[in-house]
Every structure is written in C-alpha cells, then in structure tokens.
Amino acid sequence: MIGRLLCNKYILFFIFFLVLFFVFKENSYIVYLLIMIFIYAATALTAILPIGHVGQLVLCQGAFWGLGAYLYALLIKYFAVSPWLCLPIATLSAGFVGLGIAFSVIRTRGIYLGIVTLSFGVVFQLALVNLNNLTGGTSGVNAPHFPRVSLGGYRVDFGSDAFYYYFSLVAFLGIMAFLEWLMKGKVGICLRCIKQDETAAKSIGINSRFYHLLSFFLTACIGGFAGSLFASYQGFISPTLFAFESTLSIILSGVVGGITILSGSIIGAAFVVIFPEMLRFLADYRVTIYGLSLVFLLIFLPEGLTPVFEKSYRFLLKMIFGKM
C-alpha cells in the first residue's frame, strides 16, 4: 500500500517539497530558490505543451510570462484592482493575446513559426522599454505582494514566503494534473496525431486548426498565470527580466527535464534555477561551464533527466518494497 502511494508522482512531489520546506524554512535564500523552481516548472509547461506534444516551434514563452507579470502590476497601479482578481484577469488576458497571435500565424509551421513568435517576444520587450509612460520603461514597476487579511480576529499574511511556497507548489501540481488529464483524453490523442502527421490527421476528421489555437491559448494562459505569480512574489519587475534569455531558460527547463514529459518540468526547472547558483564561485567562467554542461547533457541524455530519475526511483522502490 505504501509502495503504491509512493508511485503517485503528485503525492511524492508534495511530500518531498513539504519536507524540504520544514528543513530549510529558516533559510530565506533556499526558500526563494524553491519558489522560483515551482514558478519555472509551471512556465516550462509552456514549452513542453506546444513543442513536445503538438510540434509547434513556439519561441515567445518569455513574452507570455512578461505579459502576465506586467498586467498584474499595471492593473494594481492604475486601477487599484485586488491582487486576487489580477491573477485570473492576467491569466485570461494573456490567453486571449496568445489566441490572437495564433490566428495570425495559423498557417505557419516549423522554423517560420519560430521566427514569427520570436519576433513577437522581441517586439514585446521593446514595447516595455519604450512605453515608459505606461510601463515605467527600464526603471520597471512595483508589483505588490498579496495583502494581509483578517479572518475572525486572526491576521493571515498572504504575502509571506510560506504562503507563496505552498501556493506556487499547489498551482504547479494543479496545472500539471490538468494537462496530464487533457493529454490522456481525446484532446491529447488529437494533438499527438497532428504532431506525427498533420495531413493524415486532417484526413481522418481532426480539426487541426482548432487544436493549434487551443495549444496557443493554454500555453499563453499558463505563461500569464506564472508571470503574474512571479511579479507578485518578486515585488518588482523590469523589461530585462523578460528578454529572449527568459524564453531560452523556459525552453531549457522543458528540454532538460524531457520535452515530452510534463512531470519533467520540475526536474528541468530545478536544474536551470539551482545549477547556475552552484557555479557562482567560478565567477567569469560560470556561463561557459553552464553552457558546456547543457551541451553534454543534451548529447548524452537527449530525452532529458526525468527518465534517469524515474528508473532510479523505481529501482529503489523495488529494493525496499519488492515487486509492486
């Protein structure tokens, strides 16, 4: 019974990170890194869904992330909207922007789709810099934390690290569970058919146009949600945070974990967040070593780190509980 429970990835993730929090809750730096892992893991899903499951070379994940972040901050700044309302508004707004982009590139495929979406990301960052009367330009803009709330005489601090830790963890697990449920049903089957051979998929009645639009919408929604959560936690955002490097980090999080494995996003995100921090002592050589490590990783483990972790974990369970 215990062995079967430990085979459930959601229970495993939750227990593992619950223990981590109680071990390191006094160390604000490590808690910060763990929260960033959850946020990056959610954004990594915006690479895994279109690239790994649909075959769309989407390269504007950083723009969706930034759109959600700036919508959160600007809605509070100019309209005094509650931070709790800003989350769903930013999420859906980013989704509809993604839908608008999808309509404009619906016939574009492959590298051409990559160039168009990459261009959107570049234009978005330039807009953040140049629309300084609205966005604050290079000076950035403040993004308030979730407020403290009084409940029955008790004050609950929704802006604490503990709240952001659990909220980002549960949000990531919820998004991953939703996508896995989607991939196991009709939608997932249709998306995989389109990825394998779009012409053949059309010939058996699959509406590829609808599923391409759906993929863009979900990708943008997830990116927008992760961006608004990131802005709320950071407390300050600026255009440099959403340059092409952010898109690259998001895609790397997906690739390192396994570009076709949804649960691999957490492993890829952990690598992208923690490994550069471990290399800080190398100073000027840090970026070089990080880049070489990624190259070797992708050469020798093209399917990502997740299959290695899964095999090791299942072997460990067999050793402890026997055949399950």
Image (cartoon, rainbow, N blue to C red):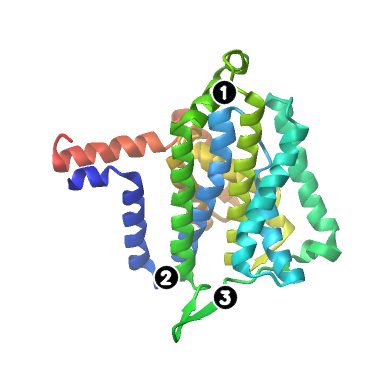
**Rounded to the nearest whole Å, what is the CA distance between mark 2 and mark 1?**
44 Å
Spatial CA span between label 2 and label 3 = 23 Å
Residue underneath mark 1: 195
Q: Which residue is mark 2?
A: 27
Residue 213 in percent (x, y) is at 66, 34
Q: Which residue is mark 3?
A: 147
Q: Is residue 170 left or right of residue 280?
A: left
Q: Quadrant of residue 111?
A: top right
Which amino acid, mark 2? Asn
Coordinates of residue 147 in the picture (x, y in percent): 57, 75
Give left or right: position of 77 versus 18: right
Q: Are marks 2 and 3 in contact (CB under 8 Å)?
A: no
Give the class, few, some or many, for how many residues have Cα within 10 Å of label 1's Cα (few <14, many ≥20): some
Image quadrant holding the N terminus, namely top left
Q: Nearer the viewer, residue 271 or 36?
A: 36
Q: Are the residues flagged by discs 2 and 1 in contact, CB closer than 8 Å? A: no
> How far, Cα to Cα, is label 1 from label 3?
44 Å
Q: Residue furthest front?
A: 205
Q: Residue at x 49, y 48 (%)?
A: 175
The percent position of residue 79, horizontal first and vertical second, equals 75, 70
Mark 3 or mark 2, which is nearer the start of the sequence?
Answer: 2
Residue lying at the far bottom in this picture: please name it.
153
- Determine the image quadrant of residue 146: bottom right
Q: Are marks 1 and 3 in contact (CB under 8 Å)?
A: no
